[in-house]
Amino acid sequence: MAGSSDRQARKIILRGIVQGVGFRPFIFLHAQSHKLQGWVLNSSGRVEIHVQGAPQNIEAFEDTLIGSAPSISSPVIESIDRVPCIDADEFLILESQASDDADIHLPADLFTCDDCLRELNDPENRRYRYPFINCTQCGPRYTLIEALPYDRPNTSMSGFPLCEACNAEYTNPADRRYHAEPVACAQCGPSLTYSETGTEAIESNEIALKAALKALFAGKVLAVKGIGGYHLVCDARSDAAVEQLRKTKPRPHKPLAVMFPAPPDDGLASVRKHLLPSDIEARQLESHARPIVLVKKKPGSDLSAAIAPGLNEVGAMLPYSPLHHILLNDFGSPLVATSANISGEPVLTENKDIDRRLSHVANVFLHHDRPIVRPADDPVFRVINRQPSPIRQGRGLAPVEIELPFELESPVVAVGSHMKNTIALAWQKRAVVSPHIGEMDSPRSLQTFEQCISDLQALYQVEAEHIVCDAHPGFTPSRWARRQDLAITDVYHHFAHASGAYAEALLNNNDLGNMLVFTWDGVGLGPDGTLWGGEALLGKPGHWQRAAGFRPFRLPGGESAGREPWRSAAGICWEVGLDYPTEEASDPLLHNFWKQGINAPLTTAAGRLFDAASALCGVCTKASFEGQGPMLFEALAASFGGTDEFPVSALEMSRRDKVYCADWATLIPMLIDQSRPLPERAAHFHLAMAHTVLAQAQQIREDTGVNAIGLSGGVFQNRVLTEKCIALLENAGFDVTLPLLTPVNDGGISFGQIVEYGYTEDKR
């Protein structure tokens, strides 16, 4: 008891990801195993522990505390203090407490754990085939939290009172469902509803599932409500079903994700039947987030060719919710599982919205009645240079928390870019980047954007006092920022790209000085008023200087060029006095406007050069989605096996106003030479662009001594280009950083805006 000379007590405070991950029951059992008394409680993002007992037992408890923690947690010891013993004969889990000094880390949505899967498939278990089975180690988190602390009354499960059996588990610290906030069963929890136009809704879980499967076997498109939104689902082997989905969505060419069954004995067996995952891709498929991973197709697979037309990869994922597992196991083969949304918008989450807005796409619907508090699309990864590189952050990973290399004086929110929008909230030395929101072209995107800004501030108990936005005045987030009653800082688009890469490089090199960052993407407003996108920026956040780029050219039609690659091709041809003999470019008025600079802005964008190359080769002149031409062009380059069989050099360079300018003109004759196979032309173009990166880097190193290189911007999602760039640069002795915490595309802009703002304010 208290006061005994052979007993001691410690007060331990942990921060990090310690809530919503079964951490308190772990502490309870951990303390019991070491014969300690005391208590544990949640306190606004932290976990507080009082342990007392024999000194050697306390020491053993402390030594194994972090190493034995749940794998889905990420605890950090904030403090350990010796304190007086209290009157305690057992170890207790106390009620959560609010605190004025919050240190909140939101738990991400979790995939269904092996224990729950065993119960799901066990006919003797009371949760057999229950589509919402979960425990403290799995199930939804971020998408159902309404407020903190993370307790059931503060989630969308508050409307489902626990039955006696579930309550016994929920209140038993030794049970793995102790305070698993989404816990439920068929007697007290959420349930499925199947509906089809013109028929009466079915509200029985098992009957609804059977009706949904019958519809899938009949070739219909099914809208399924999941954890963070709806999927549109159909038979991935059926050309007719996939083409029907494409026609009605409409989504004529953009790749569709495929979800594969994950049998208990070998979760990747179905994937390997159809695809050729590398070891790294296989590990990423089975990682905690269960993301979509781009994987090479396997010859002879019976997946529909309409899933990813013209491409040699498929976006694959494994089921991550119990409902997905049941559907995939019962169907027995892969299903297309693409986001249920209007093109570019956030994924839909409401039953009524699906019925109203996508009834022309889906024939049938599988709803459930657990509310989704906020949308979270599936994350997407591509392995580049043997590292999983995020293309889109989302469910299971977001919000992404990053430690800043500086401390902010006051909280700030960065509102990102117009395309692939995310927002970032930052305060002190923390930045939190939201899940993917999407393109900011619709009222619903703006609504989700505003909800996300409000949500993050409310959940993290932080109120932004400043807004950072893109310098482009026409971007929707920038226009929104100017309507708010807060101070605003503009950040140039490519400065944000460069600053995000710099912050990641700092993680591996605390003494990082100047850096050279290649910022290659579509287009973004530069400080000179032109559209940048092929720059190499030298310096550090707050102090970027343009050091290299491409020969500028005018884009006929301006923003229309993003979906019409022929415009970029016409622009570079006209720039060097060549005709572009296609029907689209035959209008003399268009050429006259181009000569006068009317709706024909100057650009240096590498992304537009890739568009031009694909159009000049006849691969893609009109795109149904952003990046279609470059993606098809990369697939051709990847299919060419003889990349070292012909000599390729860097583009010719000149120096203008201290900027090394690469001239793309020498590539045009090669691109239009129809005597050369398409894959060879595509490979030649990619290699020439990679060698240009090396040549510019070497010249700038010779001038300045800089040796640290960053690669940022959507063009560096291109694996053929990026891996060749990294190989050339590293062979030449450069230290290369490809961002991995946030996407290199515009999904990383909000984080880069925070970094650029922080360094500018700090006057570093």
Image (cartoon, grey):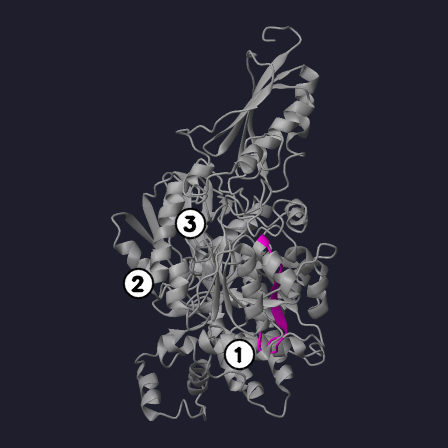
Q: Residue at x 35, y 61 (%)?
A: 444
In the rendered view, tell whether residue 354 sits above or below residue 671.
Answer: above
Taking 592 as reference, is 397 left or right? right
Q: Secondary structure at mark 1?
A: helix
Name the mark on residue 473.
Answer: 2
Q: Which residue in the structure is indicated by mark 3?
A: 373
Q: Earlier in the sequence, mark 1 or mark 2?
A: 1
Secondary structure mostly seen in magenta is loop
Q: State the image coordinates of residue 563 (x, y, percent, origin top left).
A: 43, 77
The quadrant of the rendering that contains the N terminus is top right
Q: Amino acid at mark 1?
A: Glu
Q: Amino acid at mark 2?
A: Pro
Magenta stretch contains residue 306: yes
Taking 498 as reference, is 463 left or right? left
Magenta stretch contains residue 738: no
Q: Is residue 739 visible?
A: no
Q: CA distance from mark 1 to mark 2?
A: 39 Å
Question: Between residues 476 and 133, which one lies in front from this camera angle?
Answer: 133
Q: Residues within 10 Å of mark 2 (few under 14, many from 20)?
A: few
Q: Residue at x 27, y 47 (%)?
A: 486
Query: Which of the 4 image quarters holds residue 566?
Result: bottom left
Name the mark on residue 85.
Answer: none
Question: Between residues 536 and 445, which one lies in front from this camera angle?
Answer: 445
Per the rendered image, the range of residues in magenta is 304-322
